[in-house]
């Protein structure tokens, strides 16, 4: 790999961007593709490979390519240090996510309850302004408190994070959507971006079961499929 190519890949990773190296299998020609902005046929194939975390051969417009995917790490941001968050932290880490928790309630978000987890006691909008969400970020809103959730939701909706999940009943979701509409978001955006009630409907009851349903839904969305 050429030095300039390696440098570009490292720079993309450091900035939290995915990048794909496309190699023409006949000529050996290399080119780097930004899957977030390249709309060509090759760019679309690169975007699919990046979303699936899958490097491999691809036949595109009569040419044989090998697509090498260089993705930044996955990230889960949990808003609300509630009981569900504890098993969700463990499961998400096993699935390859780095995890951070945001909750201004210092009695809930403690190192004793969440050892070795990055914890912020800022309000969610402030915390997300300091460390913005990226296309490899998922956000789970679990606080069930509009004062905490709503500012973070506005920040998440303005980002390009791949998953936004919100805890609460359908009645709670409707009230939340009404507040977000008043904040300037349209119904189509809310329906497309927000998964609520959070998690796949698997009949989950315990915090661990709910955490399983959340991680399963995140995986469906990450891999380019629609959740149930």
Image (cartoon, grey):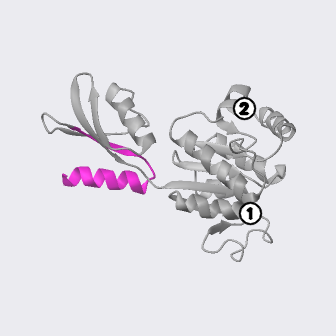
Position of residue 85 relative to residue 33, above or below, is below
Tag 2 and tag 1, C-beta contact below 8 Å: no
What residue is disc 2 on?
A: 185
- The single residue placed furthest to the front in the displayed view is 203
The crowd level at tag 1 (other Cα within 10 Å; few <14, some 14-19, many 20+) is many
Whether residue 160 appears in this view of the structure is no
> Which of the 4 quarters of the picture holds residue 78?
bottom right
Q: Quadrant of the C terminus?
A: top right
Q: State which tag comes first along the sequence, 2 or 1.
A: 1
Looking at the image, which is closer to me, 169 or 11? 169
Residue 16 point in image, percent of width and height:
46, 52
- The single residue placed furthest to the top in the displayed view is 61
What residue is disc 1 on?
A: 81
Residue 202 point in image, percent of width and height:
71, 44
Residue drawn at 60 percent across, 58 percent down: 130
Whether residue 176 appears in this view of the structure is yes
Residue 133 point in image, percent of width and height:
57, 50
Residue 49 lies left or right of residue 175; in this view the side is left
Residue drawn at 37 percent across, 39 percent down: 34
Residue 59 lies left or right of residue 189; in this view the side is left
Residue 179 point in image, percent of width and height:
82, 37
> Which of the 4 quarters of the picture holds residue 157?
top right
**Which contiguous range is marked in magenta?**
1-23
């Amino acid at each position: 790999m050429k030095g300039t190519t390696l440098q570009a890949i490292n720079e993309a990773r450091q900035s939290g961007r995915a990048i794909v190296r496309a190699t023409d299998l006949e000529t050996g020609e290399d080119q780097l593709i930004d899957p977030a902005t390249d709309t060509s046929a090759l760019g679309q194939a690169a975007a699919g490979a990046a979303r699936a975390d899958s490097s491999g051969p691809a036949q595109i417009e009569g040419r044989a390519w090998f697509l090498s995917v260089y993705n930044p790490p996955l990230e889960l941001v949990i808003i609300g240090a509630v009981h569900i968050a504890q098993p969700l932290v463990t499961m998400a880490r096993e699935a390859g996510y780095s995890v951070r928790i945001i909750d201004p309630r210092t009695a809930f978000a403690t190192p004793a309850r969440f050892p070795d987890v990055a914890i912020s006691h800022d309000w969610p909008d402030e915390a997300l302004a300091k460390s913005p969400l990226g296309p490899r970020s998922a956000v789970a809103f679990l606080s069930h408190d509009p004062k905490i959730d709503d500012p973070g939701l506005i920040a998440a909706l303005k980002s390009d994070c791949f998953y936004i999940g919100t805890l609460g009943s359908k009645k709670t979701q409707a009230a939340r959507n009404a507040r977000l509409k008043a904040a300037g978001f349209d119904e189509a955006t809310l329906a497309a971006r927000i998964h609520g009630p959070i998690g796949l409907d698997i009949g989950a009851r315990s915090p661990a079961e709910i955490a399983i349903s959340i991680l399963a839904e995140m995986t469906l969305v990450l891999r380019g499929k629609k959740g149930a």
